[in-house]
């Protein structure tokens, strides 16, 4: 029965694909991707700027205040520095991970092309 | 399980997209767009709706690709998104009070003018049009896209047993519809 249905479904029309519409569509989607990318970069810089601002605020507080205000300023400065570090490390970690993954995939592709066979399975 | 070169290349493109490579994204769209569109067209039964659904799907992919840690799941993930968008589209249609059958008939008439299929295919098309979009999705995933039961279960987020029983029921229903015609 399954083979019968499979054979029949080969003739199941999936509509006629409009190639002209496709190129315009690809451009539109590409623009949205670019916009999203820019948004992500801006978001990252805003967070980094916010962390830097907290650090500067804390540093100024340490210099000009006395008593418990200094403690508060010190706390703010530490939070700011750490937040900035976390943001930078997070970005670096993601980029490094992606670079390694990319190189691994390129290597797998090269092996497949050289041997003419499918590459070994990943663990 | 060994991966084909095409699968590895897709994974490479997804990684590049996550890195912010616009050219890789364009290539990924080029490689997957047609397949997703045909799936959407089969489920919705309308060519114009398929364009809308696929556009929403790509917007969803753009939003979520940064969080896609396991790049090997991209095909199933993309089909899950397109399927969800098709379901949303169906809900919107019902809310607007339009009959799905009218739309499918209309679009089918358009495509009928363009192509001359044999009688067997026509009766099959007619029978498929009578199925619900959920059932059409199941058939398209299994027989047109070639996913296995476990992958369909992952895409539709239902247990494997449910996929098997629904497939069985859908095939029986299709057979009955074809016999009736």
Image: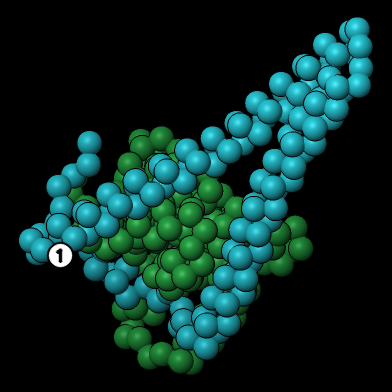
User: Residue B79, relative to residue B25: is it above or below?
Assistant: above
Give chain B's shade.
Answer: green
Lateral position of residue A32 relative to residue B97, left or right: left
Q: Label 1 belongs to which residue?
A: A113
Query: Between B170 and B73, which is closer to the camera in this rendering?
Result: B73
User: Residue B68, relative to residue B147: is it above or below?
Assistant: above
What residue do we see at 80% from left, 36% from top? A53
Q: Quadrant of the C terminus of chain B?
A: bottom left
Chain containing the residue with disc 1: A
Numbered label tally: 1
Q: Residue furthest left?
A: A115
Give chain A's shade.
Answer: cyan
Lateral position of residue B134 relative to residue B96, left or right: left
Query: Between A94 and B60, which is closer to the camera in this rendering?
Result: A94
Q: Position of residue B137 (x, y in %)?
A: 46, 57
Q: Secondary structure at mark 1?
A: helix
Is residue B97 visible to the viewer in this orientation of the structure? Answer: yes
Q: Position of residue B142 (x, y in %)?
A: 34, 56
What residue do we see at 60% from left, 31% from top? A86
Q: Position of residue A74 (x, y in %)?
A: 78, 17
Res B159 quadrant in image: top left
Lateral position of residue B5 relative to residue B38, left or right: left
Q: Quadrant of the N terminus of chain B?
A: top left
Is residue B104 visible to the viewer in this orientation of the structure? Answer: no
What residue do we see at 91% from left, 21% from top? A64
């Amino acid at each position: 029965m399954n083979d019968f249905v499979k054979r029949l479904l080969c003739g199941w029309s999936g509509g006629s694909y409009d190639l002209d519409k496709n190129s315009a569509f690809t451009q539109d989607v590409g623009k949205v991707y670019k916009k999203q990318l820019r948004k992500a970069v801006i978001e990252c810089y805003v967070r980094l700027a916010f962390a830097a601002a907290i650090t500067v605020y804390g540093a100024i507080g340490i210099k000009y205040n006395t008593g418990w205000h200094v403690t508060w300023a010190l706390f703010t400065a530490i939070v700011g520095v750490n937040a900035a570090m976390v943001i930078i490390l997070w970005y670096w970690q993601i980029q490094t991970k992606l670079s390694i993954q990319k190189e691994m995939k390129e290597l797998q592709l090269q092996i497949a092309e050289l041997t003419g066979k499918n590459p070994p399975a990943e663990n | 399980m060994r991966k084909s070169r095409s699968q590895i290349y897709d994974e490479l493109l997804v990684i590049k997209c996550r890195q912010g490579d616009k050219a890789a994204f364009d290539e990924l769209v080029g490689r997957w767009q047609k397949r997703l569109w045909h799936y959407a067209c089969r489920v919705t039964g309308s060519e114009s709706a398929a364009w809308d659904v696929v556009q929403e799907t790509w917007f969803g992919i753009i939003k979520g690709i940064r969080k896609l840690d396991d790049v090997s799941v991209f095909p199933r993930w993309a089909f899950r998104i397109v399927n969800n968008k098709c379901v949303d589209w169906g809900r919107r249609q019902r809310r607007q009070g339009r009959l799905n059958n009218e739309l499918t008939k209309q679009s089918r008439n358009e495509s009928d003018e363009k192509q001359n299929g044999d009688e067997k295919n026509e009766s099959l098309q007619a029978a498929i049009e009578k199925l619900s979009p959920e059932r059409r999705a199941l058939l398209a995933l299994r027989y047109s896209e070639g996913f296995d039961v476990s992958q369909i279960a992952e895409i539709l987020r239902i247990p494997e047993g449910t996929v098997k029983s629904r497939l069985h029921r859908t095939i029986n229903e299709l057979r009955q519809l074809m016999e009736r015609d």
